[in-house]
Amino acid sequence: MVIASDRVHARARVACTIVIVGCSSGAQKQVEPERHAEPVAARDADATNVAPGTGDVQIRVEWHAVPIELRRSPARTPCGTAAAPAVAPTTTWGVPDAFVAIDAAGAPPSTVARVVLERCALAPHAVVTGERVAVTTTADAPVALTIEDAAGGHARAIQLPIAGHEVDVPVQRGATYRLSAPDGDTAWIAAAAGPFVAVTEANGQATLRDVPVGRHAVVARLFVRGDKTPRTARGEVDVVAGALAEVTLDISK
């Protein structure tokens, strides 16, 4: 009887051991998702596509207390639409259509910007281009526009044919041009001399990608209808590899 009892206890001990091992195996399986967390995180980091030794820069341009006469439409166009205001700030004074540039080395863009005349209005009102800009119209009759260097250079006439045709206009890198429609609407064209030039969007911000690491000078310029010189603000930004740097430039003064 004693021997039988010992055998029973031995079997019980084996059963308990099996249960414990089974529980331990189950615990190990619960840990497996954590072992897969690192590769997933690594893939997410790669998704930013930031080149080695570079970072991104977000530039915000502000103009506090823009005069009301610059924020409202000056008149009606011949097409019966409201003419665009000189400045259209956000409720937090972010300014769209301002040119921003970072002084860092690199090849200038080879892209060709496009400006369209539609219903007596030019769009967009500010563009960055390479060595030429494409101008077109949606009108069903020819129209003449004027382009001139914003610094006061010689004005040239651009004869636009009917809708469906584009005219390529050569521009000089580093210069900014004013494109004028017959009714007085204006678009500004910056022929970029470097790779890091952009236009602020409706929220007053622009993001420049893959800027070399280091401290760089930053400038913002806003051309306002009726002003001889642009409103300008300058600053600096420290670019860190793989990170987003932020800088705000105030052109209020």
Image (tube, rainbow, N blue to C red):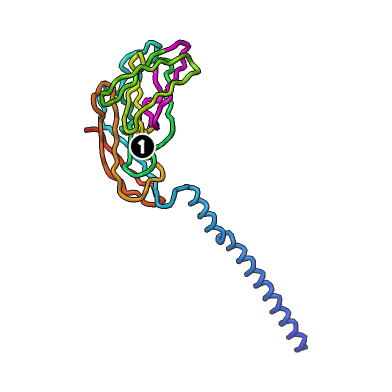
Q: Position of residue 3 (x, y in %)?
A: 76, 88
User: Which residue is farthest bottom?
Assistant: 2
- Nearest the eye: 148 or 62: 148
Q: Quadrant of the N terminus?
A: bottom right
SS at circle 1: strand
Is residue 122 a member of the stretch shown in magenta? yes
Q: Residue at x 62, y 63 (%)?
A: 29
Q: Position of residue 248 (x, y in %)?
A: 30, 40
Q: Which residue is mark 1?
A: 197
Q: Is residue 249 left or right of residue 132?
A: left
Determine which quarter of the picture holds residue 194: top left
Q: How many marks?
A: 1
Is 98 magenta? The answer is no
Q: Amino acid at mark 1?
A: Val
Task: Tell me the magenta residue range.
Answer: 121-142
Q: Is residue 90 visible?
A: no
Residue drawn 51% across the image and 55% down it = 42
Whole-percent x and y of residue 150? 28, 25
Residue 35 left/right relative to 127: right
